Amino acid sequence: MFKKILSIITKEFSGENAKELTAGIANFHRIQSSPGFRAAANYCQSKLNDYKIPYVSILSYPAKGNNTYWGYPIPKEWNINSASLALIEPKGNEKNLCRFFEVPCSVIQRSKATPKEGIVGEVVILPNGLDEKAMSEYDIKGKFILTDDPDLNKLRLIAINKLGAAGIIYDLVSELKPIRTRANFPTAKRYTSFWYGSKGEEGDALGFVLSAEQGDELRKLIKKIEKENLERKDKKEPEKKVKVQAKIDASFYNGEMEVVECFIPGEIEDGKEILAVAHLCHPKPSAVDNASGCGIIIETARTLKTLIANGQLKKPKRSIRFLLMAEFTGTYCYLATHEDKIENFIAGINLDMVGADQTVGGGRTLVMEKTHIALPSYVNDVLSAIVDEAAKEVINFQGTGAYATFKYANDQPFSGGSDHYLLGYPDIGIGTPMFIQWPDRYYHTSEDTIEKVSPEILHLVGSLTATYCYFLANAELPDILWSAQEIAAKGRERITNYGRKYVNDLISKLQTLSDENKIKERSIVMREALDNVGLRFLFRKEIEEQTLNSLKVLITNDDEKSAIDEIISKEQKILTEHTTNETTHVKYALEKISNSFHITLESHDVKAKEAIELQAETIIPYKIFRGPVGLGAMDLTYEEELEHKKIIAQYKEAEQTLTSTFFWINNKRTIAEIAELIKNEYNKASIPLLMDVFKFYEKHGLLKLKQK
């Protein structure tokens, strides 16, 4: 098993060195496709070479704005030398509002340049939530708009490109209640960026970012001057204006995007590898997000190389590959240009925001997030077991138990938002759990600094990561058999827990229908629950069987195959029996609950299918590109964005199912079959939503809808 490996690695892994590496990376302004990102990549390569890690290289990809990988555009290279925003009127109030060299987050990243002398303009407050018509009623042409509207793309496309505003002054605080609110987070500046498609529109807007405190102060000044101007008007005196001078020295050009790659070779020449990734991008300093992930990756490579070189760990059977890249973008570049390697990656791990000191900032729980249910994988239970072992830090008085001193949440369901989302897509198929610390008060702000990084947390996450990578790289028959039993035991537990949740959710729903006038509704809800419980359990059982079968990628010879086939067959029989028992138990519980609510379970006719349901049985969505089907690959106008939002708004109850929807597309399933899988996952689905969304995606070239 992995316990000895964890013990050895824990002694070698250096949290202090990982923090020093994190600090080095945090010194670079690492916007995707930029000289700062390239400098950070060169720094990482230099450190890996210092540690004599074998096979270190930097891969470069064209960054032209109009080139794509699997349909995903790679942004043009952007270089910024300086930027500043100064308050120049009214007299007596002059001061610098922000300067790039002091706080790099104070400029909206990927802003266009101003003339050398800058741009002078009046500042006006633009309320948030305005549509184009309402926005056009404000006099903003040639002026700077002060706003905290969360829809930055709307501001860029409408306020600047259509209505002629000179630029944006942005004081939005993205709230994470109760940890981060505008009231309790006054001094940070939000990481904000313009993102462009592939139509060559780079450099069509500029903007600056103020803290909530600065924004409130500027708003107060504008309102004060407006009030004074009313008095001046009565006295026929000239009005005063609040004016700023903006200067930005920046440029867009055809450049390059880098991916740092290093590799620890294994003994077996079958090409099988473990993949560990972290994203290198984000503005200076962005220490936790995600210099910390990159620092851990480099220290993990050093730790494993050292232990293998001195004989404390033997050379692994399989190879371990490490990638540091721009989030999503660099991962697309690498996978699309190494499609021949993808099937060789038998496990992955993604490190995103993994070095935060848990004693500051609130939240920052270490979360182990699993792969999506559409890609059942053994990796989740293996990593979960390693986390549980590492959490046995402190032994109680009698030595009968142990527990953690750090905050953690193990075995959490998939939520996406990072590179494991891309790697774990079923048609890519790299089972990749993620470590992340969430929520984080300082996330995506200028206050994500190195002082908030903990060497102890870096040591913990690094030890877990290195153990996971080496254990799977070197897994032999005893390790695979242990993994099978671990997966089977947890699988039975998941089946039991699902049954418990099924019953609890039903009781809660019935309690909301306690009104005497809702007798019929209660009867329908209970009847549906009884009718569907068998299908829901069958779905869960099939997922657990696929998880067990995923272990077979670790087999290297016939003896292992025979032993693994035997134990999987045995565990699947036990799982089938367990599922049958749980289904019977839940049905019995539902009948008793029905009696307690005085529900009469009448038989009912099968409802005739509606036309749209019949149509859904005949249409198969086909993906155009490998990997995620997402709006990031679309060049949408603002009107098209609104169209998409309106589609989703019609189906609020099913909105949360949309992310899963695209995981179930395999170019074979009909829309109706996909809806059934979603229903098994969420206990709800909307065929009209799927039809509308798929048609929208087909219209924009990401899907084709074909007749079965």
Image (tube, grey):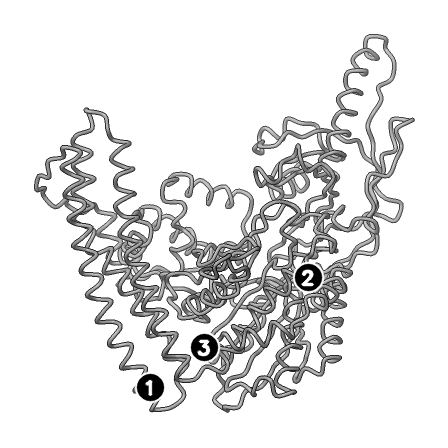
Q: Nearer the viewer, residue 69 or 192?
A: 192
Residue at (58, 31) in percent of width and height = 130
Mark 3 or 1, closer to the camera? 3
Q: Quadrant of residue 96?
A: top right
For the C terminus, the quadrant is bottom left
Q: Nearer the viewer, residue 339 or 555?
A: 555
On the image, the x and y values in percent for residue 652 come to: 39, 40
Cα–Cα gap, marks 3 and 2? 27 Å
Question: Seen in the image, is 132 located left or right of residue 51?
Answer: left
Pointer 2: what residue? 455
Q: Residue furthest right?
A: 92
Q: Secondary structure at mark 2?
A: helix
Q: Would residue 687 be visible to someone looking at this image?
A: no
Picture layout, residue 561 above or below residue 506: below
On the image, the x and y values in percent for residue 350 come to: 55, 65
On the image, the x and y values in percent for residue 313 come to: 57, 84
Pointer 1: what residue? 561
Q: Would residue 245 be visible to someone looking at this image?
A: yes
Q: Nearer the viewer, residue 562 or 220?
A: 562
- Tell which circle, 3 or 2, labels the residue nearer the N-terminal end: 3
Q: Secondary structure at mark 1?
A: helix
Pointer 3: what residue? 1
Say which amino acid is labelled 3.
Answer: Met
Residue at (65, 45) in percent of width and height = 361
Residue at (43, 84) in percent of width and height = 476
